[in-house]
Amino acid sequence: MKVVGLAGYSGSGKTTLATGLIAALRSRGLRVSVIKHAHHGFDIDQPGKDSWRHRQAGAYEVLVASERRMALMREFANPSELSLHGLIAALDAGVDWVLVEGFKHGSLPKIEVWRAATNKPVRYPEDEKVVAIATDSPDRLPQPTARPVLDLNAPQALAAWLVDNSAQFLYRPPIAV
């Protein structure tokens, strides 16, 4: 499997880029999984539904499954910093690509998503894991770079770049000591 991070500040277009990349990679016959970092509490089930009631009753894990879909919810008693590599290990090993949205401090190769309009700083000068920049304003990048600068609004072209450079995104889990 190949893994690439999409890192950038809120409002930079990470989710829009991710959804475009999913469609572009799928159109090439590739299977894509996504890991999305959430900063706050969130729910994927709805109040009153059985899975919600199970969690409210105190279940540590609730796995909801049908012939078409599966969702696993786990409740942590205390805030817990999850291992990105542990999350990747929980995915189906048969996927072709994993898009990791968020986790900007992660140790995976990543594409920095940057829009001049957000007025946020760039990370690429200090982050060696940034392998490319996806932007809608290449002429306004605050610092020159030798890294590829990709069109944020062209997910098909960005997917082609990922596939053409897939060797650098081959996932190698860390070796346990």
Image (spheres, rainbow, N blue to C red):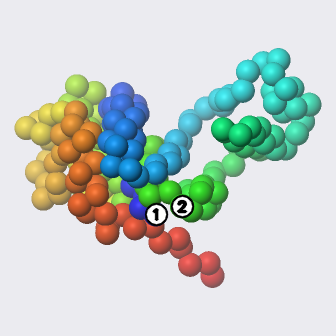
Tag 1 near tag 2, CB within 8 Å: yes
The residue that disc 1 covers is 1
How far from the left and from the top, in percent, is residue 13?
A: 33, 32
Residue plotted at (23% across, 60% down): 164
Tell which residue pokes out farthest to the left in this image: 139
The picture places residue 60, in percent across and down from the top left corner, at 84, 44
Helix, strand or loop under label 2: loop
Query: Residue at 64% across / 57% down in the picture?
Result: 90
Q: Amino acid at mark 2?
A: Gly
Q: Report the front residue among 109 and 72.
A: 72
Residues under labels 1 and 2: Cα distance?
7 Å
Q: Position of residue 173 (x, y in %)?
A: 53, 71
Type of amino acid under label 1: Met
Q: Quick check: 117 left or right of 43?
A: left
Looking at the image, which is closer to me, 58 or 51? 51
Going from N to C along the chain, the mark reached first, 1 or 2, is: 1
Can residue 103 be seen in this snapshot?
A: no
- Choose top left, top right, bottom left or bottom right for residue 176: bottom right
Q: Which mark is residue 94?
A: 2
Looking at the image, the residue that sits furthest to the bottom is 177
Residue 157: mark in rendering? none
- Residue 87 visible here: yes
Task: Name which residue lies at 18% across and 40% down.
Answer: 151
Q: Quadrant of residue 51?
A: top right
- Disc number lying in front (1 or 2): 2
Q: Residue furthest right?
A: 57
Q: Secondary structure at mark 1?
A: loop
Q: In the figure, residue 49 lies in which quadrant?
A: top right
* Residue 162 against residue 137 in the figure, above or below: below
Q: Up-down: is 5 above or below 66?
A: below
Neighbour class for label 1 at 10 Å: few (<14), some, many (≥20)?
some
